[in-house]
Image (cartoon, helix red, strand yellow):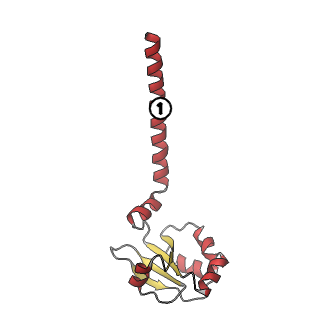
Amino acid sequence: MVKAFARKGSSSGTLYSIIIISAVFVFAIILSHKDRIQESFFNVSAKRYSVEYYYMDTCGHCVEFNESGIWDRLNSQTFNKVALKKFNRSEHIERVNSFGITSFPTFIAVDNSTSTPTIVASFEQARIYDNLLAFIRNYE
C-alpha cells in the first residue's frame, strides 16, 4: 500500500511539473508576441505610427508592386515606432472609406496615438524600396 501511494505521489509530482513548465512556456510565448496579440485581438496598435499599404486585386499597378516583393522586404525589417500594415480594399472597405482612399495603390502614415487614427502623410514618390524605407523612417 505504501508503494502504491509513493507511485501516485510521484506521478502527480511529475504532472505538476509538466503543468508548471507548460504554463511558463505559454507565458513566455505570449510575452514575446504581445504587440501582435494586442493588434489582432483588440485592434489597437502598440506602436504610435503605422505605414499602411492599400491595394486592389484588380489594380495593375498594385499587382506589379505586390510581385516586386518590396513590401515583403520592408515588412521583414523591425521598426521601433512604426507598424507596417497591408489592406486589401475588398476586405477592408470600411477602413478605406473612413480614410477617403480613392486611388490604388495608396501608402499612408497613420498616427494611432489617439482614439481615432489620423492620416499624417501620404506617400507621393516613386514606389521603390529606398523611397518607401525613407518614408517609414520619418516616423521612427
Image spot of residue 18 (x, y percent): 49, 34
Residue 130 shown left or right of residue 29 in the figure: right
Image spot of residue 80 (x, y percent): 50, 67
In this view, the residue in front, 85 or 96, is: 96
Q: Amino acid at mark 1?
A: Ser
In this view, the residue in front, 16 or 125, is: 16
Residue 127 shown left or right of residue 38 in the figure: right
Q: Which quadrant of the view contains residue 5? A: top left
In this view, the residue in front, 31 or 4, is: 4
In the rendered view, tell whether residue 12 sits above or below residue 70. above
Q: Residue furthest top?
A: 1
| Residue sitting at x 34%, y 74% | 114
Secondary structure beneath dot 1 equals helix
Say few, some or many: other residues with alpha carbon within 10 Å of mark 1 (under 14 / 14 to 19 / 20 or more).
Answer: few
Q: Residue furthest right?
A: 68
**Residue identifier under label 1:** 17
| Residue sitting at x 45%, y 20% | 8
Query: Which quarter of the rendered picture does the N terminus lie within?
Result: top left
In this view, the residue in front, 140 or 40, is: 40
